[in-house]
Image: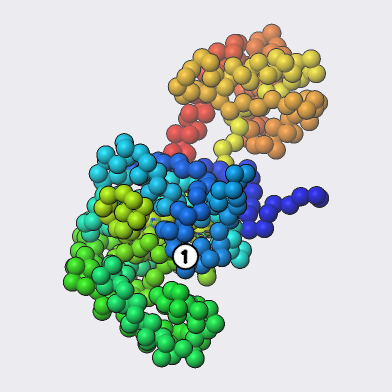
Amino acid sequence: MKFQVPRGTRDILPGEVERWQWLEERTRAVQALYGYREVRTPFFEATDLFVRSVGEATDIVRKELYTFEDRKGRSLTLRPEGTAPLVRAYLESPALRAESPARLYYMGPMFRYERPQAGRYRQFWQIGSELLGSAKPEADAEMIDLFRAILADVGLRDVTVLLNSLGDTVCRPRYREAIRAYFKQHEDRLCGDCKERLETNPLRILDCKVPSCAPVIAGAPSVLDSLCPECAEHFEGVKRALTALDIRYEVAPRLVRGLDYYTRTVFEIHAANLGAQNAVGGGGRYDQLVKDFGGPDTPAIGFSIGMERLLLAVGEESWPGPAKPDVCVIALEPGAVLEAQALARALRGLAQEPSRRRALVALVDTAGRSANAQMKWASRVQARWAVFVPPGAEGYAVRDMTKGLDEERQPSIEALRGWLSERRDAVEAVRG
Ligand code: HAM
């Protein structure tokens, strides 16, 4: 084999892709019910967009960007996340800016040069929602409610909502200094990475998974004790709103997240069965980002869900399984293939019936197989029926492949289409 899929990426093939389509359809429907509309931004952006938002000192920007120069020497980067591109698009669109608040979502691949492992890839997919234009705790609650609704709709209910506040531009710098001073006292007990973080990003030490750092982290002052009155009140408001919506949460004072744009609320949702990479998704408030990008003062909040992780957490039970063909049209003799193709096209019914209510999934063998081999193929693809051409004197012969039974012949294509689609509908009605 000359070529292999690049490290940290994967192909999503038929058999699995149906699960993705199912997840995408369900998520879109839930987003629509909450009034969120889709935005599709380019897969690459100016590098600076991510440096200025995600943050120069973060792992994402320091180690994980896919950055390249285009032919005119511009520095571009494959998007590692969707929030900064969405904010850029929002600022460039007068129509979006006129909506206040704007409720938007995106779905697509993101790129981070990380060490691949289960649930962590270099190209991975995210579903993300953003609400721009509200500073109210009720907006935070709407976000977490939407996040949970998406998970619940695909059958994931056993989750933990972790909630924290990182303060704002008033109280966070104070906390940063307090925690830097604390960790400085215990520098000799920190791992190499954390020693470096002491200078660049002391808050991230709270997130370190190296066991030897754990006891030092356990003794660190809590961010919640250093919130200014406004941030503390906002946090209380979020908790009140979540309780009113019957959403259980855990306050997690060590939750810091890996992007720098957050202010006040941050949250993650964890699923018990995901192992080390147990965050299905996360998000938070970013009240300064729109302004930092040169826009008007626009408080905002959002989250993203990792689609690979969500599918892992959902498991196999909830989704309905891949669709199977309704019909294989079998050419009984080599000269009948073209007739088989024409019949299959009529059964699909696209031209006759734009609503597609009676459209059937119809397949024809185009590999020149014998009639016998076509029948084997029809069972292999699990077609519900086989229909034979050319028709006999009494019309089209139909075989129910699930029972191996010959049904009554159908005198015309229209009769055949009606007969098949009625029975197909009945089967679907039973399946629900
Ligand atoms: P994030 O926590 O970096 O947040 O990513 C969100 C989710 O994307 C993670 O919880 C995880 O499920 C998934 N994810 C991240 N990296 C990988 C990876 N290498 N492989 C597989 N899945 C991954 C953000 O990206 C923010 N933009 C969220 C946000 C939206 N904040 C405000 N609005």
Q: Amino acid at mark 1?
A: Glu
* Image quarter of residue 173: bottom left
Q: Tell me: residue 324, above or below residue 172.
A: above
The quadrant of the rendering that contains the C terminus is top left
Q: Looking at the image, how many numbered discs can be counted on the residues?
A: 1
Q: Residue at x 50, y 43 (%)?
A: 42
Horizontal arrangement in the rendering, residue 118 relative to residue 270 (left or right): right
Q: Tell me: residue 333, above or below residue 117.
A: above
Q: Residue at x 76, y 50 (%)?
A: 3
* Image quarter of residue 386: top right
Which sits in the foreground, 33 or 361?
Answer: 33
Image location (x, y in percent) of residue 309: 51, 58
Q: Tag 1: Cα neighbours inside 10 Å, few (<14), some, or many (≥20)?
A: some
Q: Residue at x 61, y 63 (%)?
A: 116
Image location (x, y in percent) of residue 216: 43, 87
Residue 221 visible in this rendered orientation of the protein: yes
Q: Residue at x 59, y 61 (%)?
A: 113
User: How did the renderer colour the structure?
Assistant: rainbow
Horizontal arrangement in the rendering, residue 362 relative to residue 203 (left or right): right
Image location (x, y in percent) of residue 346: 59, 16
Image location (x, y in percent) of residue 2: 80, 49
- Which residue ends up furthest to the top in the rendered image? 393
Q: Pointer 1: what residue? A: 56
Residue 207 visible in this rendered orientation of the protein: no
Horizontal arrangement in the rendering, residue 15 relative to residue 260 (left or right): right
Which sits in the foreground, 174 or 294?
Answer: 294
Numbered disc 1: secondary structure: loop
**Cβ at disc 1 under 8 Å from ligand 1:** no
